[in-house]
Image (cartoon, grey):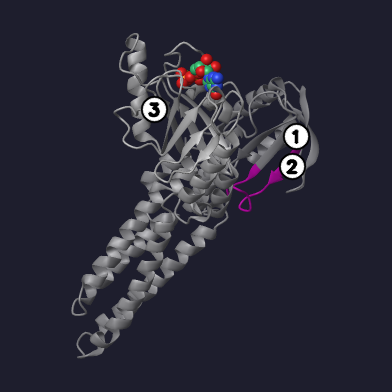
Amino acid sequence: MTASDTIYALSSGAGRAAIAVIRMSGSHTPEVLMRMAGRLPTARKLSLSAIRNDRTGEILDKAMVVWIPGPGSFTGEDCAEIHLHGSPAVVSAVMELLSAQPGVRPAEPGEFTKRGFLNGKMDLVEAEGLGDLLQARTSGQRRQAFQQMSGQASSRFESWREQLMQIRAHIEAGVDFADEPGVAEAAAPAIDMSIRTLRSQISAELHRSAGSELLRDGFRVVLAGCPNTGKSSLLNALAGREAAIVSDLPGTTRDAIEVTLELDGMPVIVTDTAGLRSDVADAVEEEGVRRSRQHVSRADLVVWVWSADVIGSRSLDSSIEQPDMLIENKSDLRETESGLLRNDRDASFRISCQTREGIDGLLAELVSRLRKRFGDVESALFVSARQKLAAERSIRYLNDALDVGSENLELKAEDIRRASEEIARLTGRVDVEEWLGAIFSRFCIGK
Ligand SMILES: Nc1nc2c(ncn2[C@@H]2O[C@H](COP(=O)(O)OP(=O)(O)O)[C@@H](O)[C@H]2O)c(=O)[nH]1
Ligand SMILES: [Mg+2]
């Protein structure tokens, strides 16, 4: 398998659809197109062609074909797209035909994008952004991914790299004058000032990006409580569907059930857990309880659900010190007022999953807490652990550079070089081989 292989894949979703798009990239593309469509269509224009099996002469479909010669294509290579009728039978016939062509093989996940990166069509940040955009489920995720994909983040990184190169040039000019007394000393304050300015810009962005993984991975809300207090009912009420089994038999929920919600553009994973009690009925429930405690320990927000009809259910499980929210369910059973009971310590709520009383208020409170936690992460500059690591390392080298006195300019220049290498790593300008597999394998086949 070499980069000169011509690759193809079904780029649209699998299954029956109105249209299915097969994409092709590589040097054999024009000859394969000529064989299948009988001619090479006008470049970059959709044209209707009969797709023919070149051996049997059978017409497999009438399709819209577009021929995109390299280097002005997504991958930088000769490319084509064939827009077929989207039935599985048509798609598999055309895929079979393609795989029979010499020098042509199915693409690996992310291989089109990887070729685009290797051919300089996009940098690594843009490729990562594209991967995130394809996986985006909420509007917040879409905005964050688009900012990365469209090169806004990259141009910021690039400007930092250029500033670092200037600083380095400035220091090296001092090295050249090292024999002349006073020259290096005179330049030192200005150099250190620009290092400090850059350092504070990078760390401010790191700080602002603190919650960006939350937006990528989802905010974890865990519903915990004693058996029968209505945790599963609450999950269903929040999800707006019957995701979990509700029963008056205590210990019904044996394993955690997760539902992903979009609240105000933010991804929220709500987990319903097995009721926490010490006198478990059997080993399966015991395991359920163990998992519940594990979920609680990993939660971003812990909700304790209790209800007046379950004696002792207001007392917290030993694994929970202080829940972020304390919810009394089944308010319909009691003649007391529902809604948010303002209590600064533990924002207590009284709700009824049966009448839905208080549920909207609870959702509104969740959104406002999420907003606080997410801040403006949609516009965060650093979105992945990889990017944050590079930024942290560059800050470390900038600190080192500031620690070096003006008598040791070569060392200072070396620290700056290392800092700029870390920034260059962000966009994939320097050796990033180790990250390529991780980044491109997240893509689906056909992208
Ligand atoms: N009256 C009343 N019953 C409820 C309410 N929420 C849940 N229940 C009932 O309480 C029982 C336990 O509910 P479930 O959601 O399975 O509790 P879990 O064990 O905490 O998951 C079921 O019989 C539910 O119908 C409520 O708001 N009001
Ligand atoms: Mg349950």
Q: Which residue is mark 3?
A: 314
Residue 420, percent across and down? 36, 64
Between 378 and 82, the one lying in front of the other is 378
Residue 211, percent across and down? 44, 49
What's the mark number on residue 40? 2
Relative height, residue 161 to residue 437 (above, below):
below
Q: Residue at x 45, y 41 (%)?
A: 347
Q: Nearer the viewer, mark 1 or mark 3?
A: 3
Q: Residue at x 66, y 22 (%)?
A: 92
Alpha carbon separation for disc pair 3 and 2 = 73 Å
416 magenta-colored: no
Image-quadrant location for residue 274: top left
Q: Residue at x 31, y 35 (%)?
A: 321
Q: Point out the stretch of residues depicted in magenta.
A: 65-79
Alpha carbon separation for disc pair 2 and 1 = 7 Å
Image-quadrant location for residue 429: bottom left
Q: Residue at x 25, y 72 (%)?
A: 402
Which residue sits furthest front?
335
Q: Quadrant of the C terminus?
A: top right
Are the two marked residues, 2 and 1, in contact with CB atoms closer than 8 angstroms? yes
The disc labelled 1 sits on which kind of residue?
A: Ala
Q: Which residue is mark 1?
A: 37
Relative height, residue 189 to residue 443 (above, below):
below
Between 226 and 177, the one lying in front of the other is 226
Ligand 2 within 8 Å, label 1 CB: no
Between 107 and 317, the one lying in front of the other is 317
Relative height, residue 251 to residue 154 (above, below):
above
